[in-house]
Image (cartoon, helix red, strand yellow):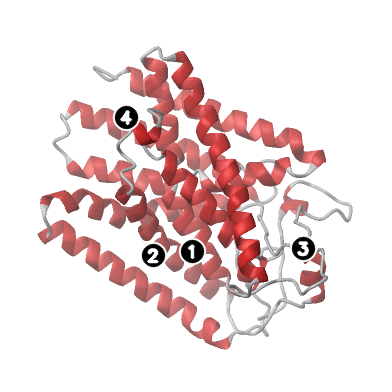
Amino acid sequence: MGEATATEAEPLLDKSLDIVDDKKPPTYARSGSVLVYGEIRHDADNDDGPVAATTQIDANYAWIAAFGMLGTCLRLGLGAGAGDSPWTLGLLGPLWANALGCFFYGVFARTWLSVNTPAIYAGLTTGFCGCLTTFSAWAIATAEHACRGHVVRTVLTIVVPFFVGQGMLELGIFAGDMLERRGVIPSALRPGDVDVDEEIEKGEIDVDLPLYDALKLPLGTGLLVCFLVTAIVLVCVGPGWVVVPAAAAALTPLGAWLRYGLGRLNMGGRLPWGTLAANALGTVLDATFILLMVATAGSDPFLQALVDGFCAGLSTASTFTSEFRMLNADEPLRHRAYVYAALTFLIGQVLSVPLIAARPYV
């Protein structure tokens, strides 16, 4: 792999938040975990490197789309639309899908993966976890409770999923560390190492993977094509109950790609503006499509597919949760974590409540 650039696999927090001293982004003692500020990851090289920057970015997009479709299928398979079922505590449908996505994010947020296989890392975190979780449905459920005048339930719908997500993220980080120590997944640290950043600087974990470099783009593209073809066939000839989930899966890459592109706004900002924009846009589009569904009496399954696929893929709870956790872990930046969370929820409600209130019923 070539010499790293500023947008490669190095942590972005110090540059994004204007830290000019030698302070490193928060890492965890004797842990191979890394939570990177922003979603742009590529091992783009100099001219001597084995992989061109454009090839790496293309591979990222392919793996994000393919794994994102799997995340959407799992979310829908968990019955994320059943918002009033007892196991969701009457708060929001994707409560446990969001929790599971945050757990997997903690497991997959491995420094070794982000440095050596960034396309797979992006696919697992931005793709699978980002599409398994959804912020737009979270904001819509909160707005619906608010429009019904359920004050307590409205507050609980914000607070409970937030802390459940934080707890599951921590559990995922712990599980990932245990898997590393048992050799199940490659580790960024050797016994006795404390700071993973030191290992990155020394180049100890940056290894050459020629098979990965050769196959990451064709394999990721092949998986994406297979998944898309399967989804389209199911939409055309599958039984009625599978049409909407298959269409949602097919639309997921569009939302995930847009979110990944907006992630560039995270770079150079004092807050994760890209993720904030993705969640805001996903929420307002989600509320708009739901309003149209009500107007058409739910006769257009394409609108439901847009809600479950495109909007849910565009918005994300796992990245929001991880970015809050990372900012909150660094004392000088802690206030930004709470500003970020407050802005995310406030904008979500400002955008969704008027649209939800405009429905004939809520």
Number of residues whose C-alpha sits closer than 10 Å to that of mark 3, classed few (under 14), some (14–19) or many (20 or more): some
Q: Of marks 1 and 4, which one's residue comes earlier in the chain?
A: 4
> Does 219 sit left or right of 291 as displayed?
right
The residue beneath circle 1 is 123
> Which one is in front in this view, the residue at disc 2 or the one at disc 3?
3
Distance from label 1 to label 4 (Cα)? Answer: 31 Å
Q: Position of residue 293 (x, y in %)?
A: 22, 32
> Which one is in front in this view, the residue at disc 1 or the one at disc 4?
4
The residue beneath circle 2 is 66
User: Which residue shows up at 42% across the image and 17% down it?
Assistant: 146
For badge 2, the amino acid type reads: Ala
Determine whether label 2 and label 4 are within 8 Å by CB.
Answer: no
For badge 1, the amino acid type reads: Gly
Q: Secondary structure at mark 1?
A: helix
> Which one is in front in this view, the residue at disc 3 or the one at disc 1?
3
Locate the C terminus by quadrant: top left
User: Which residue shows up at 39% across the image and 40% down it?
Assistant: 94
> Which one is in front in this view, the residue at disc 2 or the one at disc 4?
4
User: Which residue shows up at 56% across the image and 33% down it?
Assistant: 344
Determine whether label 3 and label 4 are within 8 Å by CB.
Answer: no
Distance from label 2 to label 1 (Cα)? Answer: 7 Å
Is 13 located above or below residue 85 in the figure? below
The residue beneath circle 3 is 30
The residue beneath circle 4 is 84
